Amino acid sequence: MKKLIFTTLMICVAFSATAQHRRMPKYFRNTSERRHYEARRPGRSVNQNTDFRFAADFDARLDSVIGANDFDWTQWKNIYTYNENGQWASETTYELRDNAWLPTERCEFAYNENGNPVQELYSRLVDGEWSQYYKVETFYNTDNQMDSIVYSNWNDDVWVGASKNEYTYSDGLLSLLMAYRNSDGAWTESSKYEYTYNGENQLVFRLYSTIRNGSWRESSRDTLCYENGMLATFSEQVRSMGWGGSSWRDSYRYEYAYDNGLLTSETYYSTGMGGTPISLKNKSEYDYDSNGNLTAKTTSIFNETDWTVRDEYKNTFDLQHQADKMMGAEALWRNFTYYQNVLGEAMPIHNRLLSSYIISTSLDTHFQIFYSDMASVAENQVDAEIRVVEGMVSVVTEKPADIAVYDVSGRMIAQKHDDNFTINLKSGLYLVKVGEKASKVVIK
């Protein structure tokens, strides 16, 4: 009985939250959750080719994120590795079970010669072995713009395409997104987004259409208005009920306020159940520190006359270090989508995020972020002669010293106390440490 009451209560809470704000900020624990969510909502992000950007000159990199969901007492962590170019190579999710961290999911990333992500391969740990189950493939045109994305499922030992998005550009701007679904082994058109921009290349109109019985039907349309170059309002209209309806009705509207270029409030209006007139529903208020870091976000629900706090987000930062000097920062910010506005654009973060605490009606989450400090790595400043010839690294010193070689993930490959050291290595980026000093070497 208790379980039934609890389940019923949770359904009511979830339904209430959806009705109050069907586009409430979404928190993702990892890349897998974000991708699955985006796959069901194509076209919501205008800048979709910015998921993986990394600092060229870094003094730290993201190593892990450790969190706990207070609502269901789940403790989890994500651990990241990097390739020789400093891009994410893998993201592995662990859960704490019986006081031991056990891996549950893994995503492996691949890139093309231009550094763009071309594949994300997802696996689950099943009976002690990794079993692939989901794949995202990204293709690019000759202008290095995203041409298409294909989402596939692993079924009966073969990859089966589930959905696909194709992108068309005009003057360098996304003008059409065509979504397909797999129907009996063939790609079938299912929906499309059409985009219109103003003279400043800002999105001002987006039309969403679905295909019904072989014909296109306009389903919703978004209008965006700007003031002083900043987004002021974002509104949606939906088509009247019934096939062939020609009238449009308001669905929802966002209003934005800023202070010195920083978003300070986001007010949301929408229609109620049964298509009641549009009215005030909730608002989000943002607070920043003197460095422009988002320190708090509070979302409140409007109940006729009073405001009730629903969600709170609180962040702490390392003010001594800048985020753009951290490898992996951009992908991290893209994952934690409460840092994004309604268009999916990442809000600026100027310093390294150390921890966040999310208090909501459905899930309380606290997580901490850990980095590897690369500031002690000084290139070409070692008291030793280091040579790289045909995949071989040799180190010669005047007197015996502690010599160690590390791969890009920080794993020690070899160690020796000597004045002459030689090792064969595969292609990649490595750190050669002699005493307390280190150098980067690249094996091609």
Image (cartoon, rainbow, N blue to C red):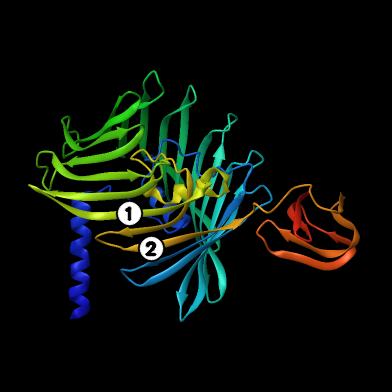
- Front-most of residues 121 and 359: 359
Mark 1 residue element: strand
Task: Please provide percent x and percent y for residue 97.
Answer: 45, 78
Task: Please provide percent x and percent y for residue 312.
Answer: 28, 55
Mark 2 residue element: strand
Would you call the spot at circle 2 few (<14 residues within 10 Å), some (14-19), or many (20 or more)?
A: some
Q: Which kind of residue does numbered mark 2 sit on?
A: His
Would you call the spot at circle 1 few (<14 residues within 10 Å), some (14-19), or many (20 or more)?
A: many
The residue sitting at 20% across, 76% down in the picture is 4
Residue named by callout 1: 313
The residue sitting at 32% across, 54% down in the picture is 313
Task: Please provide percent x and percent y for residue 203.
Answer: 36, 28
| Quarter of the image with the N terminus in it | bottom left
Say how many tags the image has. Answer: 2
- Front-most of residues 125 and 149: 125
Residue named by callout 2: 366
